[in-house]
Structures are given as C-alpha cells and as structure tokens.
Image: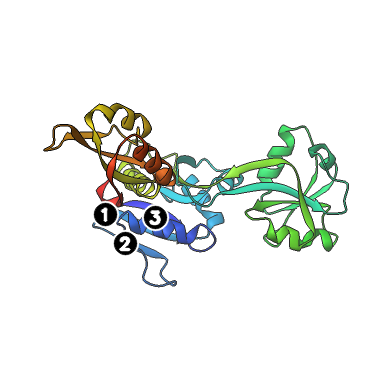
C-alpha cells in the first residue's frame, strides 16, 4: 500500500482531510487514531506533525505526504514536490517593530532574527550575501522582539493581524510564497502507478473546486462567438438541437468567472444557461 502522511493539526490539516475525503479515501474516526488503513484504495494514512512530514518522506519511511512548501524547503531533506494542492496559501515575511528603522533587506545584516524556519531564512540571507544571528523559536516568535531576544522576526503571514497586535510591521520583499503541496520520497518513482492514482484523484478534486459545468443553447451562426467567450477547461461539446438553427453547448468554465461569462453569452444570443457544480468522483 502507498504510505501517505497528512498533517494531524494546524492550518493545513482540515483542508487536507477534506481533499482526501472528496477524493474517496477513508479518514480516521477520532483524533487519537494515528494510522488508518484503506485497503480498498490501496493507501495507509499516517497522521503526523506538519513539521515532521517532510523528514519522514525525505528518508523514505513514508512514500508521500501533504505539507507546506515552506516546511518542505526548511526541512532540508531530499523529499520532492510532486504537485501543488491549491490551499494553505501564505507568505513568508520579515517583520520589525513599528518604530524601528528597518526598511530594506540590507538593514537585517548583523541583526538578530527570530524564526521557526532557520534553514529557510539562513539560505535566503546567504543568497543575498547577508549575515544575521538566527534565533530558533518553536512558536510565538512575535513576542521575541518585545522580550529582547531578537531585533526582528521572520514568519508566515496570512492576514497580518497577529503581527499588528504585536506592534510589528512587514518590510522588504517576501522571502517566499507558499501553499500546500503533495511531496514524494526520492525512493518512489514519480511514475509509480499508486502515486499516479492518488495524483489523478486529487487533481479531480481541484478541478471540481475550480470549475463548473455550463450548458446553454446558442444560434448556429453564433457558435463561434460563444466558444470564443468560453474556451473552457477542455474543448466545448457542441450538439445539434431539434430546431436546426440552434445548437446546444456544454463546457467547463472557471467558477470565479461564471457571472461574467453568463453576461457575455446573453449578449451574443445564448439562452437557457444552466450552471452545474462538478463532483470530484466524475473526474
């Protein structure tokens, strides 16, 4: 069976569980269950700390895992990103006290930086030919400046509310943009059939989340104009109707653009527009 690591807690955990559930996999029944066997689907789920997933996968103890790109890079392991999963978006930034003089990246040189991502920060500064005293903290790095442990921090930023509450402000360019990804062990062939099945199912969930099915009727003379408006995820299906002057069109379109596309289709003469949500099981 394919051994898969999933976050047992944190911001990535629930979206990861939901994605696996929508893909048809069995999840744990309670929070104390650390391993779930799903022989019908050929996988075994291991609920692990998000910080440890890349380590297990990199060492080959686990075949694949779901974690953040930032956690993968900070792990320094040989685990490899296999596919992005479209959730858990965040930005990794430097932040300093509101009344400090920090403005540019160069201002960090020689200063104390508190972070939970030692390797990520050190590699970034080295790439920019800067040096700093990296102070590792496992959590609540925002308090480090006020307590005199550090001059500034480097941390994951989602909304920025926590930083503002701590009297900190963001400065300099982002260190990186991150999102959840599926990673694989270097000992697992990227073309392994088990991995291919998992990847296709997860891609099916992503497609169902991002696209909807749109059906509409359009005069034959306007089909080309309608298709130009809705090129879709795949080529549209065009079918003749009983009235020979009309065609029926079916196409997958981005969920975020539905209202805009409907307005444009009505303008070129479409009618009976129906929008249907996709199901991952159909992909």
153, above or below 162, in the image: above
Figure quadrant of residue 116:
bottom right
Distance (Cα) linking label 1 and label 2: 8 Å
Distance (Cα) linking label 3 and label 1: 15 Å
> Is 255 positioned to the left or the right of 52 in the image?
left
Find numbered disc 2 in the image and state the secondary structure of the residue it sits on.
Answer: loop
The first of marks 1 and 2 along the sequence is 2
Confirm or deny contact between disc 3 and disc 2 (CB under 8 A): no
Q: Position of residue 30 (x, y in %)?
A: 40, 72
Find numbered disc 1 in the image and state the secondary structure of the residue it sits on.
Answer: loop
- Label at residue 19: 3
Distance (Cα) linking label 3 and label 2: 11 Å
Q: Nearer the viewer, residue 83 or 224?
A: 224
Density class for disc 3 (Cα within 10 Å; few <14, some 14-19, many ≥20) is many
Residue drawn at x 68%, y 61% is 139
Q: Is residue 163 visible?
A: yes
Q: Position of residue 265 (x, y in %)?
A: 35, 38
Residue carrying label 2: 26
Confirm or deny contact between disc 1 and disc 2 (CB under 8 A): yes
Quarter of the figure with the C terminus: top left
Q: Position of residue 145 (x, y in %)?
A: 82, 58
């Amino acid at each position: 069976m394919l051994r898969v690591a999933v976050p047992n807690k944190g911001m990535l955990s629930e979206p990861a569980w939901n994605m696996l559930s929508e893909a048809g996999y069995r999840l744990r029944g309670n929070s104390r269950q650390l391993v779930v066997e799903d022989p019908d689907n050929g996988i075994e789920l291991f609920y692990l700390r998000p910080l440890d997933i890349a380590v297990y996968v990199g060492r080959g103890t686990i075949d694949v895992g779901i974690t953040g790109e930032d956690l993968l890079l900070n792990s320094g392991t040989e685990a490899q990103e296999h596919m992005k999963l479209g959730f858990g978006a965040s930005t990794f930034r430097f932040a300093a006290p509101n009344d400090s003089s920090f403005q540019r990246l160069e201002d960090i040189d020689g200063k104390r930086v508190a972070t939970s991502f030692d390797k990520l920060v050190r590699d970034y500064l080295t790439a920019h030919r800067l040096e700093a005293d990296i102070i590792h903290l496992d959590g609540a790095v925002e308090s480090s400046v006020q307590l005199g442990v550090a001059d500034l921090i480097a941390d994951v930023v989602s909304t920025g509310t926590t930083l503002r509450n701590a009297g900190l402000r963001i400065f300099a360019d982002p260190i990186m943009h991150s999102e959840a990804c599926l990673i694989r062990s270097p000992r697992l062939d990227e073309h392994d059939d088990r991995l291919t099945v998992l990847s296709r199912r997860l891609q099916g969930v992503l497609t169902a989340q991002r696209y909807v099915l749109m059906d509409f009727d359009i005069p034959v003379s306007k089909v080309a104009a309608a298709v130009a408006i809705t090129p879709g995820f795949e080529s549209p299906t065009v079918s003749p109707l009983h009235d020979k002057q009309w065609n029926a069109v079916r196409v997958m379109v981005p969920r975020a653009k539905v209202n805009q596309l409907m307005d444009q289709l009505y303008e070129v003469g479409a009618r009976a527009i129906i929008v249907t949500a996709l199901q991952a099981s159909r992909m």
